[in-house]
Amino acid sequence: MQLDELIKINRMKKRLTQKQLASIMIFSRQTISRWENRDVNFKIATILALSGALSVDSWTFDVSEKESVYIEIHRMNHTDSDK
């Protein structure tokens, strides 16, 4: 599955419109649309931001017919006692 498909599927699971996701991420709705229509190359920072906005802990997506990428996100919880 391609990353653009995963973004749309996960956005819809959260019952978010493109406009709502854009607002959460401080992007335009058109940017979300481009992401979902393969009109952009993704930076790792964007994938991490999407992970947070969509509560996704890992992504597995195709980068070619023969290669896939798996990204697992580990969030650290900081408390005042950690400082």
Image: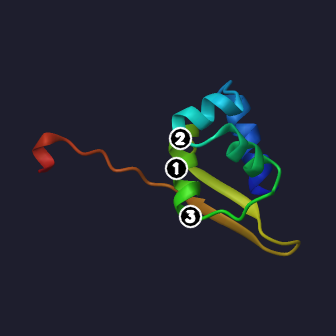
Dot 2: element: helix
In the displayed structure, 46 sits above or below 30; it is below
Q: Position of residue 70 (x, y in %)?
A: 65, 64
The residue wearing badge 1 is: 49
The residue wearing badge 3 is: 44
Circle count = 3
Residue type beneath disc 3:
Ile
In the displayed structure, 3 sits above or below 81; it is below
Residue plotted at (11% across, 44% down):
81
Q: Check residue 25 in the rendering and tell me which mark sits there, or answer none.
A: 2
Q: Earlier in the sequence, mark 3 or mark 2?
A: 2
Q: Position of residue 10 (x, y in %)?
A: 69, 38
Dot 1: element: helix
In the displayed structure, 63 sits above or below 27; it is below
Density class for disc 3 (Cα within 10 Å; few <14, some 14-19, many ≥20) is few
Front of the two marks 3 and 2:
2
- Work out how far the residue at label 1 is from the one at label 3, CA to CA, in angstroms: 9 Å
Residue plotted at (40% across, 50% down):
75
Residue plotted at (78% across, 69% down):
63
- Work out how far the residue at label 3 is from the one at label 2, CA to CA, in angstroms: 15 Å
Residue type beneath disc 2:
Met
Q: Position of residue 57 (x, y in %)?
A: 55, 48
In the displayed structure, 15 sits above or below 47; it is above
Q: Quadrant of residue 8?
A: top right
Q: Earlier in the sequence, mark 2 or mark 1?
A: 2
